[in-house]
Amino acid sequence: MAKNDLQGTLDLLVLKTLDQNGVLHGYGIVLHIQSASNDLLRVEEGSLYPALHRMEQSGWISSEWSMTETNRRAKYYKLTPQGRRQLEAAQESFDQLVRGVRAVLRFA
C-alpha cells in the first residue's frame, strides 16, 4: 500500500473519531482509536500530530487550547463542515479500497 493510502487511513480514523466524539485532545483521539479497534490499531504521536497539523491546515479540523480534566493545557480538535465532507469522501474511498482488496483475495 502506498504511503498516501496509509496517510489517508489515519486521516479517516481521526476524522471519524472527531465525528463520533465531538471535541478531543490528541491523546483522547489516540485512546479512542485504540479502544474502538479493540487494541488492534495504535497511533503513535509521531504520526498523529503531523496529521492533525496537516488536517488543520487543510481546514478539515479546527483547534483550541484548553485545560484537560487533569488540569493540563492541551490542544482540543473538532471537525469542521469541510472536514465532514472530507470524511464522507474518505469513507467512500476506503470502502472502494476494501472492496478491491476483497475481490483480489477471493481469486488468490
Image (cartoon, rainbow, N blue to C red):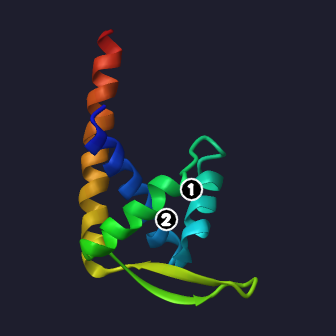
Give the class, few, some or many, for how many residues have Cα within 10 Å of label 1's Cα (few <14, many ≥20). many
Q: Which residue is mark 2?
A: 17
Q: Earlier in the sequence, mark 1 or mark 2?
A: 2
Q: Which residue is mark 1?
A: 33
Regarding mark 2 in the picture, which secondary structure is present there?
helix
Along the viewing direction, whichever of 17 and 73 lies nearer the viewer: 73
**Occupied quadrant, residue 35:** bottom right
User: Looking at numbered disc 2 in the image, what kind of residue is underneath it?
Assistant: Thr
The residue positioned 46% from the left and 78% from the top of the image is 77
Q: Are marks 1 and 2 in contact (CB under 8 Å)?
A: yes
Disc 1 and disc 2: Cα gap in Å? 7 Å
Residue 90 appears left or right of 32 = left
User: Looking at numbered disc 1 in the image, what kind of residue is underneath it?
Assistant: Ile
Measured as percent of width and height from the top left, residue 21 is found at 54, 73
Q: Which quadrant is the N terminus positioned in? A: top left
From this view, report whether residue 15 is shown above or below residue 64: above
Measured as percent of width and height from the top left, residue 19 is found at 44, 71
Q: How many marks?
A: 2
Give the class, few, some or many, for how many residues have Cα within 10 Å of label 2's Cα (few <14, many ≥20). many
The residue positioned 28% from the left and 23% from the top of the image is 103
